Image (cartoon, rainbow, N blue to C red):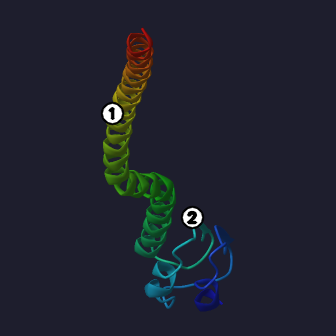
Amino acid sequence: LLACLARNPTLRSLALADNFLDDGLDPSIIESLECLQDLQLAGNRLSYGALQRAAQVCARNRQRERDREPEALKAEIRRLLPEEARLGAARRRVGEDEALLGERREAAERTSAELQQLRVQAQDQQRQMQRQLLS
């Protein structure tokens, strides 16, 4: 029964009190119950050492369960740290690109204004030359 329960990942508590279990119970079977957090063995013929070992296994499993989420979060943090650095670098590049784009737009606007001014001047010069030729 315990060997089959070892493959059950949802088993958290098991009441085996008053079942006449004795020290013939293989301790490795209890060790294999990795999800078990509460094992009730009172009223059996188990030695104090076997009861303590079962209690230690349950305590270890409870601690593992408590540590599972923080460890997963720590792993996620370690995975995301390089991403954060790349994101910062990308944001800096975007800022630099936007600044450069702004400078180029201003330069294009200045050039366009200068070109317009040169066209006006050229038209004025053409009119003056035409007047001079006509006079």
Residue that badge 1 annotates: 100
* Residue 8 appears left or right of 66: right
SS assignment at label 2: loop
x then y, percent, for residue 66:
50, 54
Q: CA distance from mark 1 to mark 2?
A: 61 Å
x then y, percent, for residue 89:
31, 43
* Residue 88 appears left or right of 12: left
Up the image or down, 15 lies above or below 113; here it is below
- Find out whether the residues at labels 1 and 2 contact each other: C-beta distance under 8 Å: no
Residue that badge 2 annotates: 37
* Three-letter amino acid code at the position of disc 1: Leu
> Looking at the image, is mark 1 or mark 2 nearer the viewer?
1
Which one is earlier in the sequence, the residue at label 1 or at label 2?
2
Residue at the image point whose x is 66% and y is 75% from the top: 16
* Three-letter amino acid code at the position of disc 2: Gln
Up the image or down, 70 lies above or below 104; here it is below
Out of 34 and 86, give the one closest to the viewer: 86
Out of 116 and 43, give the one closest to the viewer: 116
